[in-house]
């Protein structure tokens, strides 16, 4: 089967739902029409960072920090990019159309725009992957003459079966030198398994406006591509 063949293309109006450490990373362009000021929390309080007009390469990362969703912007307006973070309630998601008001962002501008999402599903194929399986192994050791050590070794060897023995008879047992006592342990072994899988690529295009009293202070256009391997079948792991 050809890995390059794309057999399924879907367009989805899906909100960005973030769990744990999931992040969506965009590369794009930040077009700033008028000086825009970002309020940023610091250990000393709130600091204002202003970026002047211009067009700059910019990266955007949509993720989660604690109980907040956040957008991290890295604007290449100088030798060292300007980094700002916009935080908002975890229940506010960025979907096909979004409008996050200034009060929710703790900024002096709204964030409004669109995000188009397209999912491409590759052709299903077979392969082999490394895996780990458990294998039983018998381990033996010799028992010395000491009655105490002999008793401990026998208890380890027979485990729960000890309760079924005649304790008086057991206490009078005399071990022979170097009597082997064996038990089973489980050992991890490297192996291989057959798998059936396909690759799924999610493409996103975001177009966001930073709006203040009806005026667009800035615009960000970015593209994201994320590919994951989806396994639909796993065979037995062995050598």
Image (spheres, rainbow, N blue to C red):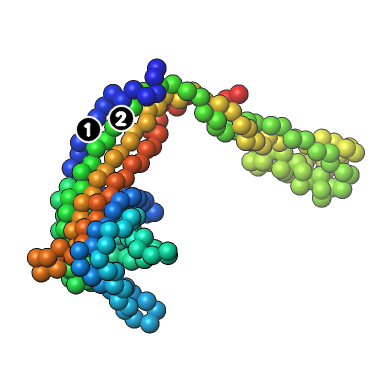
Q: Nearer the viewer, residue 29 or 118?
A: 29
Residue drawn where x is 72% and y is 43% of the image: 155
Q: Which residue is mark 2?
A: 121
Q: Position of residue 204 (x, y in %)?
A: 26, 44
Residue drawn where x is 29% and y is 46% of the image: 223
Specify whether 96 is left or right of 60.
left
Give the secondary structure at mark 2. Answer: strand
Residue drawn where x is 55% and y is 32% of the image: 131
Q: Which residue is mark 1?
A: 10
Is residue 141 visible in this depiction of the protein?
A: yes
Specify whether 19 is left or right of 149.
left
Q: Nearer the viewer, residue 186 or 159?
A: 186
Residue drawn where x is 82% and y is 48% of the image: 149
Is residue 67 visible in this depiction of the protein?
A: no
Q: Is residue 216 above or below residue 148?
A: below
Indicate the quadrant containing the N terminus: top left, top right, bottom left or bottom right: top left
Q: Is residue 224 above or below residue 107?
A: above
Q: Position of residue 108 (x, y in %)?
A: 19, 72
Give the secondary structure at mark 1. Answer: strand
Crowding at label 2, few (<14), some or many (≥20) Cα neighbours within 10 Å?
some
Whether pointer 1 and pointer 2 mark residues with C-beta atoms closer than 8 Å, the reply is yes
Distance from Cα at disc 1 to Cα at disc 2:
8 Å
User: Counting residues from the N terminus, which is met first, the one under dot 1 or under dot 2?
Assistant: 1
Q: Position of residue 197 (x, y in %)?
A: 40, 27
Indicate the quadrant containing the C terminus: top left, top right, bottom left or bottom right: top right
- View extreme (bottom): residue: 44
Q: Quadrant of residue 54?
A: bottom left
- View extreme (left): residue: 214
- Counting every numbered tag in the picture gives 2
Specify whether 111 is left or right of 51.
left
């Amino acid at each position: 089967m050809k890995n390059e063949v794309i057999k399924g293309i879907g367009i989805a109006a899906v909100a960005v739902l973030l769990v744990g450490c999931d992040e969506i990373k965009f590369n794009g362009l930040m077009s700033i029409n008028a000086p825009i000021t970002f309020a940023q929390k610091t250990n000393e309080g709130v600091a204002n960072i202003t970026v002047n007009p211009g067009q700059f390469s910019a990266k955007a990362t949509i993720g989660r920090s604690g109980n907040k969703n956040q957008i991290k912007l890295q604007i290449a307006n100088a030798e060292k990019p300007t980094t700002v973070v916009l935080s908002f309630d975890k229940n506010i998601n960025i979907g096909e159309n979004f409008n996050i008001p200034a009060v929710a962002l703790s900024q002096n501008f709204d964030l409004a725009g669109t995000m188009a999402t397209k999912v491409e599903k590759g052709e299903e194929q077979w392969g082999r992957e490394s895996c780990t399986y458990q294998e039983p192994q018998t381990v033996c050791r010799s028992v010395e003459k000491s009655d105490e050590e002999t008793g401990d070794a026998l208890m380890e060897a027979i485990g729960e079966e000890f309760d079924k023995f005649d304790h008086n008879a057991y206490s009078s047992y005399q071990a022979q030198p170097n009597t082997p006592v064996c038990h089973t342990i489980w050992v991890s072994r490297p192996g291989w398994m057959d798998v059936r899988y396909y690759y799924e690529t999610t493409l996103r295009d975001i177009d966001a406006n930073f709006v203040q009293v009806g005026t667009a202070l800035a615009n960000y256009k970015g593209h994201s591509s994320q590919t994951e391997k989806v396994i639909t079948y796993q065979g037995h792991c062995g050598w």
